[in-house]
Amino acid sequence: MAYIGVDLGGTKVHAAKIDELSSQKACRLLIPKNGTEQEVLHVIIDAITQVIDQDVVAIGIGVPSLVDQQLGIVYDVQNIPSWKKVYLKKLLEVHFGCPVYVNNDANCFSLGELFFGAGKEANSFIGLTIGTGIAGGIIIDNKLYNGFNTGAGEFGMLPYLEQNFEYYCSGQFFENIHSITGQEAFEKANSGDLAALSMYTNFGKHLGNLISQVLYTYDPELIILGGSVSKAYSFFKDGIYSSLEQFAFQNSISNLKIVVSDDSDIAVKGAAALCYQ
């Protein structure tokens, strides 16, 4: 028995067949820029078609948006302008003839860590995905807390300074504040560029302020960082802990663990885990 996990992003879709604890088949396809609702749907169907076989009993898909879990409707998908209201569950179930489960992508990331990654040994933790945006998934007593609209953990939308946390705590920070892409900043920091290293320190300070809000509201034992920006953790780690020095309950900081996800397939594994939640 196997499942399909699908991770939908603003620029690409990653689908994989998940059997036992590993990814057996995988497919990554680009999403057409400014593609219509049907064009994007066809890419997703194509990706799933390339990995599905007779062993697959269900499909789970994570999307960067709020979701009506019962009906599988996704709303206002980030970075896919044409996806305003898509009956994704129904469309895929009709096409593939098996159950389909849909949830927020940050929730899927955290589910993946719960079943397959660093969260296996934790009772409660927060998964933070840091890429083009930043969002979180909340695990409490080994269960995913979705919120009513699968929107629990949208920490990036909290007001911060003159914008919100996402403006300062995601890949947007480098373009918004320094007019440089995250990839360029990473390459410069890797080469020892002092200005780039300073950028990351400041980025970490902002992220540390967001983590403080997470600690005040959820007090987790563990925070797991994922997404493309998390690969630069060594550059912004000190900035995080510099901000956390201002946290009111320092014993919580001494007990807190912050780790970086080390599984590039964790999002699709988490999406597959929707099938047996």
Image (cartoon, rainbow, N blue to C red):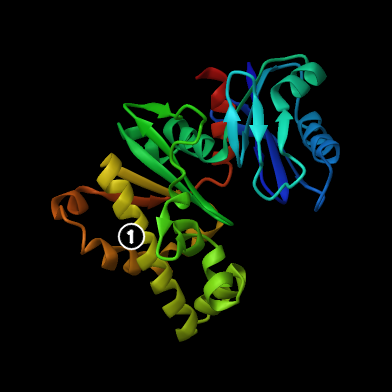
Residue at image position (44%, 72%) is 200
Who is closer to the viewer here, 182 or 88?
88
Return the residue found at the far front.
162
Q: Is residue 165 visible?
A: yes
Who is closer to the viewer here, 181 or 263?
181
Q: Position of residue 197 (x, y in %)?
A: 44, 78
Q: Position of residue 208 (x, y in %)?
A: 34, 60
Q: Which residue is mark 1?
A: 209
Who is closer to the viewer here, 109 or 77?
77
Residue at image position (71%, 43%) is 13
Q: Position of residue 97 (x, y in %)?
A: 77, 14
How many numbered callouts?
1
Q: Quadrant of the N terminus?
A: top right
Left or right for 58, reference 43: left
Q: Compared with residue 261, is residue 183 higher up or lower down, i.e. above or below? A: below
Left or right for 74, reference 44: left
Other-residue count near label 1 (Cα within 10 Å), few / some / many at <14 / 14–19 / ≥20: many
Q: Position of residue 264 (x, y in %)?
A: 57, 47
Residue 243, image quadrant: bottom left
Q: Compared with residue 201, is residue 64 higher up or lower down, i.e. above or below? A: above
Q: Is residue 5 visible?
A: no
Left or right for 235, reference 23: left
Residue at image position (37%, 51%) is 259
Residue at image position (38%, 37%) is 119
- Which type of secondary structure does the marked residue at label 1 adopt? helix
Who is closer to the viewer here, 118 or 66?
66
Residue type marked 1: Asn
Q: Compared with residue 190, is residue 194 higher up or lower down, i.e. above or below? A: below
